[in-house]
């Protein structure tokens, strides 16, 4: 396995092409969301309720840092903050 380095010699992960701030959704918008994140980064600890690509709804208690998985939506009942969806 080889590592990728950018011009500043930082190790890069070619699996992700960027990220975006996650909008918390409720109701029908939560159930029908079509975006697919390759995981989440949680900057402020709290509970995270999300929907996966297979329709499962999961709640991570006291989540912080990286949450792997194919995520399609994050619920407005989420108490964590500063959530980035990895693309």
Image: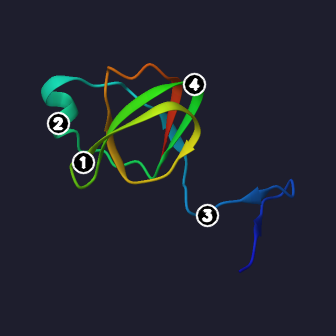
Q: In the image, residue 83 lies at what x, y percent?
A: 51, 30
Q: Quadrant of the N terminus?
A: bottom right
Secondary structure state at the residue bearing disc 4? strand
The numbered mark, 3 or 2, whose residue comes first in the sequence reads 3
Residue of label 4: 45
Residue of label 3: 14
The numbered mark, 2 or 4, whose residue comes first in the sequence reads 2
Q: In the image, residue 50 lies at what x, y percent?
A: 34, 37
Give the farthest residue toward the left. Answer: 28
Mark 4 closeness class: few <14, some 14–19, many ≥20 residues within 10 Å: some
Front disc: 3 or 1: 1
The residues tagged by marks 3 and 1 sit, at their Cα atoms, a distance apart of 27 Å
The residues tagged by marks 2 and 4 sit, at their Cα atoms, a distance apart of 24 Å
Front disc: 4 or 3: 4
Residue 31 numbered tag? 2
Secondary structure state at the residue bearing disc 1? loop
């Amino acid at each position: 396995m080889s590592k990728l380095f950018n011009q500043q010699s930082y190790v890069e992960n070619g699996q992700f092409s960027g990220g975006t701030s996650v909008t918390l959704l409720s109701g029908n918008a939560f159930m029908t969301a079509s975006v697919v994140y390759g995981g989440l980064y949680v900057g402020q600890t709290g509970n995270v309720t999300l929907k996966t690509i297979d329709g499962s709804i999961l709640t991570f208690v006291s989540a912080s840092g990286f949450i792997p998985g194919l995520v399609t939506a994050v619920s407005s009942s989420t108490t964590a903050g500063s959530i980035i969806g990895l693309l």
